[in-house]
Image: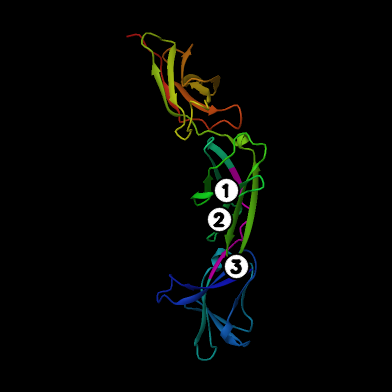
Amino acid sequence: MEIWESWWDEQAGDRARCALQHGTLGTEVLLWCPAAGGGPAEWRRGDTVLGTYPAPGLALPNTTLAHEGHYSCHHPGTSETWATICLRLGYAPAPPAVECWAISYPQAVNCSWVLDPEPLLDTDFVATYRHGVGGPTDTGECVLTGPRSCSFGNVRMFSLTPHVVNVTAMNPLGTASRILPFLLENIIKPDPPENLRVSRIPGETKKLLLEWSPPGSWPFPEYFPLKYRIRYVQEEESSVTKMIGPYEQTSYTLTGARPGTLHHFQVAAFMDSGESSAWSLPASGMPWMEP
């Protein structure tokens, strides 16, 4: 598939105006010289003469990225320039692989997506959402928060009717969409806990105090309290990971710690619905040692 549009060739020293042509990698791309009038034309790539080719134009079989560049066609006798073409190669977008998480439940839903394979061409996205049949108050734009992410509010708690997100990818070679339905409570996934601290307790050679904060993106911890799991390893047994919890408080006193040994900790947050967060950044500590 080939797409044409007018474009200023920024790489050409004289900023020549050229026809921007897009083609699909791995296929044959035909560069067409409109002024040739059905006759032969001399083709060049940059300043290199490729030869004189009959109509309809210059065929590039099994294209690779090495074929990208600035081409021109000329009168085979006078070398008059008939057209300049800037060739860009890539792929039409595949349907985006979309995932959505309520990291700030119940205020908003955050979605992100990837394309496989990468189109290698500038690709734009439109993302929308709806709830149920999508009345005027339940339909809207998922506002882009990054090149391939968006966020929307106006969610319905405890609804048995799915929310639906539709992401459409568009580039010069094509358009593709993906629809993702979900129940809000099934996609709860907090961000990791923050500010994990490990402190020794004076006089306690086998105890450590852990303290942390709920994720800053979790808007109402007092109304929607999180639960926490803790995992840790001891420096001398780094291949053995121990897991404890769940706990509802944001602190925990570890007993039975090995005296004189460094311990490494991480904490994850979750609710009874949805999925657990990723693990927090690690923090380390060693129990109190007698002077």
Mark 3 or mark 2, which is nearer the start of the sequence? 3
Amino acid type at image mark 2: Phe
- Report the side of 285 relative to 1 (left or right): left
Q: Quadrant of residue 177?
A: bottom right
10 in relation to 42, above or below: above
Q: Residue 173 at x, y = what percent?
A: 60, 64
Residue annotated with mark 1: 113
The answer to whether the residues at label 2 and label 1 have Cβ atoms under 8 Å apart is yes
Q: Residue 187 at x, y = what percent?
A: 60, 36
Q: Which residues are magenta?
A: 87-99
Q: Quadrant of the N terminus?
A: bottom right
Task: Name the residue nearer the viewer: 170 or 128.
Answer: 128
Q: Residue 179 at x, y = what percent?
A: 65, 49
Q: Quadrant of residue 246?
A: top right
Q: Residues within 10 Å of mark 1 (few under 14, many from 20)?
A: some
Residue annotated with mark 3: 23
Q: Residue at x 41, y 23 (%)?
A: 197
Mark 1 or mark 2, which is nearer the start of the sequence? 1
Amino acid type at image mark 3: Gly
Looking at the rendered image, the disc whose residue lies closer to the viewer, 2 or 3, is: 2
